[in-house]
């Protein structure tokens, strides 16, 4: 019985919400307030988008997080909070407020990235940063409006985490080879013509910046999702 009452209340709330939206649209049309009408339509689209993204949140978190990490469950909760704060901001019906919310979350994530250099957390936070930037682009597409000043490049981080690690031909060769398949140390030595401590030095540079990772069980090296994204960007330039 309680379940039936709960469902009925939810249906009534949905009907009331739709009625309010119809009334707002009717007033805007009667008064020929095309700007207001456009804002109402955009607001509705953004609400639908937020509901859709909330439903897909478990899949989004899977893309960001390493499922084999022992901190997976704890980080799921933390990462969920980042994204849900953005979705809740859409309920204010103030688009700029949502853009500001994304900028705030990006700043927090980038601070985490700086501290996570050389750890297993780096790739996961890179994935979260990517998702927040995707939310920004999607909101611009839906609304047809630019989000003010927009996300800025973290120049120092870009230099230290991408440009410097790939500035040496051996490190770039390693990334390219790992982009084809996971390889062991001896395989990489053969591919690069480099051995021992010299090769290990270059691998450490890529490991610390999260462009590659080492399989602890097998001992071989693989390109990370972030490394693959960087490699894809370089392919477009070549």
Image (tube, helix red, strand yellow):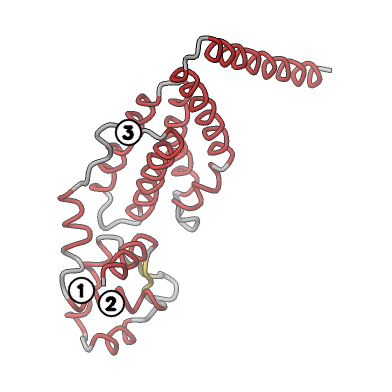
Find disc 2 in the rendering and name its residue.
174
Against 161, residue 184 (above or below) is: below
Residue 190 on image: x %, y %? 29, 90
Contact flag, marks 1 and 2 (Cβ < 8 Å): yes
Distance in Å between CA atoms under marks 3 and 2: 38 Å
Residue 132 on image: x %, y %? 38, 42
Find disc 3 in the rendering and name its residue.
147
Frontmost residue, 35 versus 232? 35
Frontmost residue, 153 versus 211? 153
Please identify the residue farthest to the right as the structure is shown. Answer: 1
Q: Mark 3 or 1 closer to N-term?
A: 3
Question: What residue is shown at x 19% (from left), y 51% (from top)?
Answer: 157
Residue 237 on image: x %, y %? 26, 68
Q: For numbered disc 3, what is the local secondary structure? A: loop
Find disc 1 in the rendering and name its residue.
202
Q: Mark 1 or 2 closer to N-term?
A: 2
């Amino acid at each position: 019985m309680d379940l039936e009452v709960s469902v009925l209340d939810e249906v009534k709330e949905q009907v009331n919400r739709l009625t309010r939206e119809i009334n707002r649209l009717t007033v805007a049309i009667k008064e020929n307030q095309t700007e207001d009408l456009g804002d109402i339509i955009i607001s509705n689209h953004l609400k639908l988008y937020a509901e859709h993204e909330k439903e897909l949140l478990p899949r989004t978190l899977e893309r960001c997080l390493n499922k084999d990490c022992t901190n997976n469950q704890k980080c799921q909760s933390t990462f969920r909070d980042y994204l849900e704060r953005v979705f809740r901001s859409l309920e204010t019906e103030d688009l700029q407020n949502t853009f500001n919310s994304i900028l705030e979350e990006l700043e927090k994530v980038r601070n985490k990235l700086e501290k996570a250099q050389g750890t297993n957390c780096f790739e996961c936070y890179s994935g979260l940063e990517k998702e927040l930037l995707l939310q920004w682009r999607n909101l611009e597409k839906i609304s047809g409006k630019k989000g003010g000043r927009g996300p800025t490049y973290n120049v120092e981080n870009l230099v230290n985490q991408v440009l410097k690690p790939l500035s040496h031909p051996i490190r770039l060769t390693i990334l390219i080879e790992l982009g084809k398949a996971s390889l062991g140390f001896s395989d990489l030595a053969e591919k690069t013509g480099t051995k021992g401590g010299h090769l290990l030095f270059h691998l450490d540079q890529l490991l610390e910046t999260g462009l590659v990772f080492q399989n602890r069980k097998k001992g071989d090296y693989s390109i990370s999702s972030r490394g693959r994204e960087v490699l894809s960007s370089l392919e477009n330039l070549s």
